[in-house]
Image: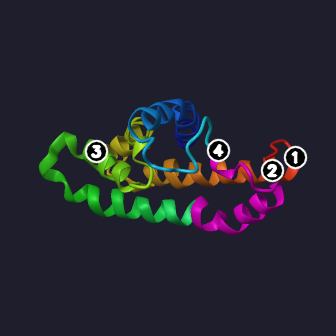
Amino acid sequence: MTYAFHVWMTVVSLSLTPLDNIVYDWFFTWVDYQGAGPDGTTYLQGYSQDLVLTTLLICAPFTGFTLPLLEEYYFRGFLLPRLPQLGKWAPFFNTFFFSVYHFWAPWTVLSKLVFLYPGVWLAWKKQDIRISIAMHPGSALLMTVVGVIALASGAYSM
């Protein structure tokens, strides 16, 4: 089941990039955001491949695993169990709070709701945070490792 979550997070989040771009173009063009663009790596354009690879290697333990893990401990481990008054709506609101918490990119709220909700709902239903940990930090680490390998091998160039 862990593999299914990795596939879901990876495929769905990447496929929703056009939605993020549409929401940005319709509502947030007034935000001068360097990373807005047609794909998930637009913000990296203009930097040398060596610089991006070095930065990825230095930041990978933090942005590729530790920070998503801390987010899961807070949002699913701490906050979600404290929303019983919301009943079956607790996973939705927890996912919404998490999405809005990424306030530096409000145009991604809709896509985050779509690709995160299934894992949050299942973690809530099973009362098992390991599910959302496998889904969020697990896929973040997977994408970081794939990105480092693609850059280092020359399969992806800047």
> Residue 78's image quarter?
bottom left
**Can you tell which mark lies on residue 42?**
4
Give the tally of numbered discs.
4
**Which is in the foreground here, disc 3 or disc 1?**
1
Q: What residue is shown at x 65% (from left), y 66% (from top)? A: 59
Mark 3 / mark 2, whichever is N-terminal? 3
- Work out how far the residue at label 3 is from the one at label 1, CA to CA, in angstroms: 40 Å
> Residue 42's spot in the image, x, y percent?
65, 44
Query: Is there a contact, CB below 8 Å, between mark 1 and mark 4?
Result: no
SS assignment at label 3? helix
> Residue 51's spot in the image, x, y percent?
78, 62
**Can you tell which mark lies on residue 91?**
3
> Residue 15's spot in the image, x, y percent?
56, 30
Pointer 2: what residue? 151
SS assignment at label 1? loop
What is the span of residues highlighted in magenta in the rendered image?
A: 41-64
Query: Is there a contact, CB below 8 Å, between mark 2 and mark 1?
Result: yes
Mark 2 / mark 4, whichever is N-terminal? 4
